[in-house]
Amino acid sequence: MDLQLRHLRALVAVVDAGTFTDAATEMNTSQAAVSRSVAACEEILGVRLLQRTTRHVSLTGTGAQVLAGARRVLDEIAHLHRIAEQSRTELRIGYAWAALGKHTRRLQRAWAGVQPAIPLVFVQTNSVTAGLSEGAADVAVIRKPMDDPRFASARIGTEARYAVVSTENPLARRRSLRIGDLSRYTVAIDARTGTTTLDLWDPGPRPAAVRRTTGVDEWLTLIAANQAVGVTSEATANQNPRPGVAYRVLRQAPAIPVWLAWWRDDPPAQLDDLIRLSREAYGNLSAHLDGNL
């Protein structure tokens, strides 16, 4: 016989209640069933877990260690149930740097009108899958192609690119910039989750240096200190204002495509509504957006 959750639950209930009788009451079962479960637990593990008297039960030394492990297992099981329940009561949208920028509130309002019983919750996870592979999100906002067969995706719109400089940088005095204007500076790049690569500078001269970063906060801190410049999407500019940082439209730079991605074998029940409303938020319902990556 294998150890089962009912064995662990019975052990924890007896220790917490103090007697088999009270444990049975807490578990809404019979005292005999609780006794059998605890006895089975001891038999399977091959050790005595409880010292029994007519009035009291107490843990053995080994029992105390097993109890701690049993509590951890039951806590993890409860956590899994909470995750499953959460997936039925809200739709979590993951993002790494920014949600949908200025379109975020528009989508949230439209969603509330169509799916009032399922809150749309945005969660930030600085990973390549923006929380999908970590289980933190049901759907993710992605701004770079994701070559992973586990996930499917749909394009919902495009965003302009912005140059980002310190307010102390002379470039901040301009209303717009070109990619070549940044070449003589150190450029901060997050290669894992950012949208900027050195290919943006081809065929012109590349930046004087590159500073690798690991997230939007570190990236912005470097730029505010005038230690680097950066390039990002308009969503970042909209959702991450920072004292000391100036966002300027980057002219003649390729737009950034925006996708929603999800587990291919486990799409959310509300996915069609989410894709449709997201495209409406971006104001782009063109047929060419219907294809997946």
Image (cartoon, rainbow, N blue to C red):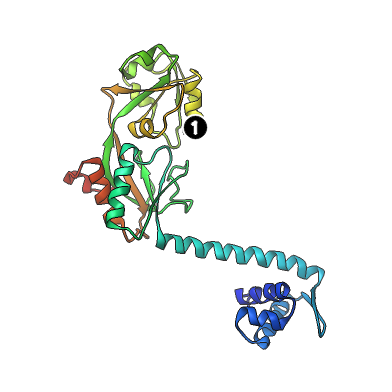
Q: Quadrant of residue 68?
A: bottom right
Say if 286 sits above or below 266 in the image.
Answer: above
Q: Quadrant of residue 74?
A: bottom right
Q: Looking at the figure, which quarter contains the N terminus?
A: bottom right
Instruction: Residue lying at the far top in this picture: please name it.
Output: 170
Location of residue 121 in the rendering, given as x and y in whole percent from the top left corner: 40, 50
Residue 37 or residue 116, whichever sits in front: 116
Location of residue 149 in the rendering, given as x and y in whole percent from the top left corner: 37, 51
Location of residue 209 in the rendering, given as x and y in whole percent from the top left corner: 47, 18
Q: Which residue is at a point 60% across and 82% down the rendered structure image?
A: 28
Instruction: Residue lying at the far left in this picture: please name it.
Output: 287
Q: Residues within 10 Å of mark 1 (few under 14, many from 20)?
A: few
Q: In this orientation, does residue 283 appear?
A: yes
Q: Which residue is at a point 74% across and 76% down the rendered structure image?
A: 18
Horizontal side, residue 188 vs residue 160: left or right? right
Q: In this orientation, does residue 205 appear?
A: no
Write down the residue under mark 1: 217
Q: Which residue is at a point 41% across and 61% down the rendered structure image?
A: 89
Give the mark count.
Answer: 1
Location of residue 284 in the rendering, given as x and y in whole percent from the top left corner: 20, 41
Q: Which element type, helix, strand or loop, lies under badge 1?
A: helix
Residue 192 or residue 70, whichever sits in front: 70
Q: Quadrant of residue 235?
A: top left
Say if 217 sits above or below 66 in the image.
Answer: above
Horizontal side, residue 6 vs residue 51: left or right? left
Q: Which residue is at a point 48% across and 17% down the rendered structure image?
A: 226
Query: Could you tell me the amino acid type at mark 1?
Result: Asp
